[in-house]
Amino acid sequence: MKTSSVFEKDSLFEYNKDEKIRSEIIKWSVLILIAVFFGSFFLNFFEGTFIDTIFTFIGNSMFSGTIFGLFLFGLIAGLFFLSVPIEVAYIAFLTKSDNDLFVFVFVFLGLFFSYLLDYQIGLNFSTISKKLISTKQFYKVKTKINQYGNWTIFFFNVLPLPSQLLTFICGVFKYNRTRLFSIWAFAWIIKLSLILIIASFFHI
């Protein structure tokens, strides 16, 4: 006897979904509180030391838009577990700098190495990585890539979408690295160039 499936194609079935959501919220709330506590302790403990000097130097470099600061911003902003408004910060750097090409190149290089790190983390620690992000989220991204191919990667990067997470998941699923970063570079060159042109046109 033939039976019809009650599940849609590519859907995922999860037990105790509400309980899992509550558990995740509690877990991340506790982790954030612990991070804030130890972060405050760390800053106070090392105040006036060499480590404090290093952090101060890093912060000043980023805010002043030096070569090191621009590169470091890209390196930090591209990490998949952070949520940084890259496009907004990039515009802010352009307004401070007298050399737009200078900003473009070093932010781009920082982002490249950051996204490469995202991919490598996903690739080398795939078992642990799958526990950091929900199964549904993983397979939703994989389904989009299977359906739309390179266009998924392109639009995730050229638009303000979570492309860091996409790159991380591509690493978990061992997506072709050369193809991924060729599309990544093309999309980000277009994005950063358009922002630069628009900012210059409106004298931002």
Image: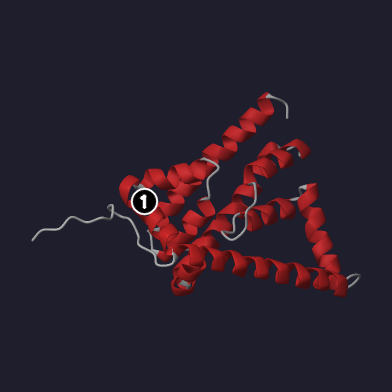
**Residue 180 point in image, percent of width and height:** 42, 53
What residue do we see at 49% from left, 67% from top? Answer: 20
What residue do we see at 39% from left, 54% from top? Answer: 140
Q: Secondary structure at mark 1?
A: helix
Residue neighbourhood size for the residue with mark 1, other residues' Cα within 10 Å, grouped as few (<14), some (14–19), many (≥20):
some
Image-quadrant location for residue 61: bottom right
**Residue 166 point in image, percent of width and height:** 47, 54
The colour scheme applied to this rendered structure is secondary structure
Mark 1, residue position:
145
* Residue 141 appears in the figure: yes
Q: Is residue 41 left or right of residue 187?
A: right
Q: Is residue 17 left or right of residue 107?
A: left
**Residue 24 point in image, percent of width and height:** 55, 66
Quadrant into which the N terminus falls: bottom left
Residue flagged by tag 1: what amino acid is it?
Answer: Ile
Above or below for 201 versus 172: above
Which residue is at the front of the view, 200 or 29?
29
Above or below for 134 versus 193: below
Which residue is at the front of the view, 32 or 202?
32
What residue do we see at 65% from left, 58% from top? Answer: 76
Q: Is residue 128 left or right of residue 60?
A: left
**Residue 133 point in image, percent of width and height:** 49, 64
* Residue 46 appears in the figure: no
Quadrant into which the C terminus falls: top right
Above or below for 125 versus 100: below
